[in-house]
Image (spheres, rainbow, N blue to C red):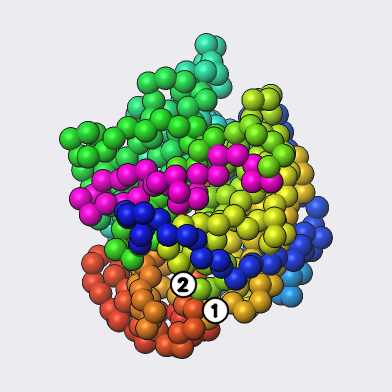
Amino acid sequence: MIRALSAMLLASSANAQPIFENHSDALPPHEYTGGWEHFVGGGVAVLDCNGDALPDIFAAGGDSPAALFRNDGSFKFTSQAIPQMAGVTGAYPLDINADGLIDLFVMRVGANRVLRGNGACLFIDVTEAWLPPGNDQWTTAFTAWWEDDSRPVMAVGNYVDRSNPDGPFEACDSNQILRPAADTYESSTLTPAFCPLSMLAARDARGRSTLRISNDRHYYVRGGYEQMWDIGEGRFLGPEDGWQNVSLWGMGIASRDLTGDGRDEVMLTSMGDQLMQIANPDGTYDAAPYEIGTYAQRPHTGDDGRPSTGWHAEFGDVNNDGRPDLFIAKGNVDQMPGLATRDPNNLLMQNEDGTFTETASAAGIATTDRSRGAAFADFDADGRLDLIVVNRRAPLELYRNISPNTGNWVKVSLQQPGGNRFAVGAQVTVQTANGSQLQQITVGGGHAGGKALPLHFGIGDADHITVTVEWPDGTQQTFKGDANTALSLSRE
């Protein structure tokens, strides 16, 4: 359990109060718009598309065109021309063709698109060359992993089958696995499928590569549940594996080792309770105790007692004290008056005893537009995680982290030869005099968007670090470094 959570919880100790400054006006105008097909989605992909070490932004537009904003530094952003695309629900950045440049897998209501990056924030549509034809589904989830030294295997999660005349309820579409074949990809179906809104390929509590799928009960209604698919064995886990079915209105996945035992805890957003799953040494998961403070089932401002709806969830150390904090994007779905309408986003700061304290209002980010996708990223390269939020039918929000008295930090990026240039699947452990932290390099999770950026670690008052990298093939290397630096580590 998280530190003292297996026993009686201690009183929560206060964190240094985070403070964010609103810089939303720095972004060109953009909204995620549309009807019922865009109740969900609204993701954001954050990547460095021109190699200047400043994160750039690709934002879904729904019925409006998707947009790319180049980061010019000092919280100034410029619209960058991209292929015209509407119907975009979200996107994930990854290097598909092993040229060392980040590409974009763009999810749509309709045929998905793949954009090849050129290193200058100019993207070329290579869909016809790289993807098999015939996909005209409603894609809302994506993840990727490498099984050999070629191109990634990609999982595509499709929501409701719009062509089903008996839908939309109990009309979930099939999911896809895309595997490299010659110069393109071959598609196979992955069923049963229960209307996924998030997928994440990562090491599970057993230490095995597993595809986790979070599904929306609103449309599968009955007979569905959250899913875990063992990548190596190519099968779904069941009770014989210690996997207990959980049914919820699954919207997003966040994964991070919170206990230092090398196993990621998992945050699952939903309507009502947001479910934290604690990883156990035997490879199973338990629901976190209510007292942990992460269930966030009602608006924390106290002016609406109806259940919240959580979307994107993400761990990040906002004050660099060495303890990952948690952001949850919140927002109602149209035509569901039983849920909270004005639902502020959450910023849950982790305390010394492993519990979390709500701070979004004091931090200045508890807005109540209907949020969907989001991302932590250090947009101004000062070592503090900033925040971008995508809202439905409302402008993007951009916040600069100006929290005082934050701790030291380190950023770690990996490169290796071969097809998996950015070492997706690696585990990175940062050791200081204050303890150790572990993060996995993954593609996927969140809600409809993710990041391709260096891993960020807060390290408190530590001045020196030891970094241990377990590369995707299991080889280990150790590196030394100093605080407040960006380390780019290459494989020998």
Residue 13 point in image, percent of width and height: 51, 65
Extreme-top residue of the structure? 166
Residue 2 lies within the magenta run: no
Mark 1, residue position: 407
Indicate the secondary structure of the residue bearing disc 2.
loop
Q: Residue at x 39, y 79 (%)?
A: 434
Which range is magenta?
A: 276-301
From this view, report whether residue 356 is shown above or below residue 50. above
* Residue 322: mark in rendering: 2
C-alpha gap between disc 1 and disc 2: 8 Å
Residue 154 visible in the displayed image: no
| Within-10-Å neighbours for mark 2: few <14, some 14–19, many 20+ | many
Q: Earlier in the sequence, mark 1 or mark 2?
A: 2
- Lateral position of residue 53 relative to residue 290, left or right: right
Quadrant showing the C terminus: bottom left
Which quadrant of the figure has residue 440?
A: bottom left
Circles 1 and 2 in contact, beta carbons < 8 Å: yes
